[in-house]
Amino acid sequence: MSDDNTPCSYIIFGATGNLSRIKLMPALYQLDLAGKLHPASRILALGRSDWDHLDCRSKVENWIVERRPEAADAAELARFLARIDYLQGDLKNDGFYRRLAQTLAEGQTYPENAVFYLAIGPDHFGPVIAGLGEAGLFAEQDYWRRLVVEKPFGSDLKSARALQRILGRHLREEQVYRIDHYLGKGTVQNVLVFRFANTMLEPLWNRNYIDHVQITHSEALGIGGRGRFYEGTGALRDMIQSHLLQLLTLVAMEPPVSMEAEALRDEKVKVLKSIRPFADGEIDKHAYRAQYAAGSIAGATVPGYLQEADVDVGSTTETYAALKLYIDNWRWRGVPFYLRTGKRMSQRSSLISIRFRQPPQQFFRGTAVQSQRANWLLLGIQPCDCLRIEITVKEPGLDLTTRQTSLDAGLRGVDEAPIDAYEALLLDAIEGDRSLFLRYDEVDQAWQILEPILHHWREAPGPVASYAAGSWGPEESRRLFDSEEHLWRHSLDPVRK
Ligand SMILES: NC(=O)c1ccc[n+]([C@@H]2O[C@H](COP(=O)([O-])OP(=O)(O)OC[C@H]3O[C@@H](n4cnc5c(N)ncnc54)[C@H](OP(=O)(O)O)[C@@H]3O)[C@@H](O)[C@H]2O)c1
């Protein structure tokens, strides 16, 4: 059933925080502009800050104007801001949930269909879910109640399971929307469209033709002022447990029976379950970690991780993590999947790179074509959302020499405005479409895959390897490669060899 454009209340915990400022409020404004919010829908912003309705509206106005000044139409903005109310309170206080329930029930202001959005630190998730549940706010009658939980869902398997138990006590799984905003990105959804709306590549999409797959997310930024948060997190938990393993499932999954949420999630979880467990004593052959040292980014000198504020001098928290995984199923057996993420790297980029096998015969032996280069298929996620296929062609002229060229498809026209992932996902939560949200078994499985690495790294003594800020990470991470021939594919730029 589509709940398209039904009136609803969006209740945002942590509405005074960073996520609300940079993503949620601007996204809700865009949805309003696009006519996707029912005229009666309302937003109830919750925070500890001592604001009233007008303070809150004025802050949100500034956030929207600073984010997308060109989209901030005065009349539209005024209409949007009038939807917002603010409720001040401490979420550690039991009385707060009673007050919230009373506010929502007062008069006819707030539609009974409601999305509760947890844009608060993960330590608060459990107590807030319990508070809302005990106040009866998840109970449904002829209206629906939904909960959006931000990442991270747990910090390891044990804490994820504990959080899930709390959820299970107060909500049905159908009410829960575990967000991974990567899945709301257009190009990420394009992986599915590209694979399943075209027949051309499907026959090649397997171990017979694909040599290996790389999934890279690199950031030029460091940890900013978030030393305390990052010390307890690290690159493996922050990026690989969620975003990169999700990308891997989309590349590797079997065609689902339909694009319905459950069919899609069934196939994704099958991939995660097929990932080969690490053999005893073999973690270092599959996982590599490092920290950025001082270096230079865009001409400016930047400090190393250990010199950042709130970072322990002897910290072993990784700012770079690389993994090699195998998917033991019929389609992928023996094909390495290399996953890599790092902060303070040379460029900001998210890229899926698929390298095809060399032709079975070197047809051009004895000619000027010394060696044939492999074909690559590249799916750029950011900053460029595009698809590129690299192929070998003959150079013009009398000699049989070749060069690489590429077939490029930009996935967005110059006149097509980008849609922020949060716009898509906030709308899906209103419409009741859970296909781009995580089911609990996916989260659990992802933690099961990474748990041995987390354990191994926790036990291993420091210091950890380092790489210069502004580089593409440590050369030594090449030790994960199955073949001397493998090299990290950093970006859309052509490879040199
Ligand atoms: N920021 C991002 O780009 C981003 C991206 C992806 C996921 N996330 C996730 O989103 C969540 C929020 O992140 P954030 O960066 O927005 O954090 P943040 O800037 O630190 O904001 C935290 C929010 O929680 C509120 N809060 C904290 N303690 C409270 C209490 N006792 N009672 C009531 N409210 C309280 C704060 O209210 P006051 O300020 O009014 O005290 C503030 O609104 C986290 O789970 C994070 O992992 C963030």
Image: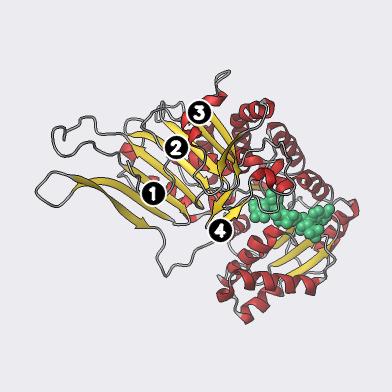
* Residue in view at x 67 percent, y 30 percent: 462
| Residue 51, image quadrant | bottom right
Q: Residue 6 vs residue 346: left or right? A: right
Where is mark 2, residue-wise? 252
Q: Are marks 4 and 1 in contact (CB under 8 Å)?
A: no
Classify mark 2: residues with Cα within 10 Å, few (<14), some (14-19) or many (20+).
many
Badge 2 amino acid: Ala
- Sequence-first disc among 2 and 1: 1
Q: Position of residue 160 (x, y in %)?
A: 70, 36
- Sequence-first disc among 2 and 4: 2
Q: Is residue 177 above or below residue 8?
A: above
Give the quadrant of the N terminus: bottom right
Classify mark 3: residues with Cα within 10 Å, few (<14), some (14-19) or many (20+).
some
Q: Residue furthest top?
A: 280
Q: Are marks 4 and 3 in contact (CB under 8 Å)?
A: no
Q: Is residue 365 above or below residue 65?
A: above
Badge 3 amino acid: Ser
- Which disc number belongs to residue 207? none
Q: Residues under labels 3 and 1: Cα distance?
A: 23 Å
Where is mark 1, residue-wise? 194
Q: Residues under labels 2 and 3: Cα distance?
A: 10 Å
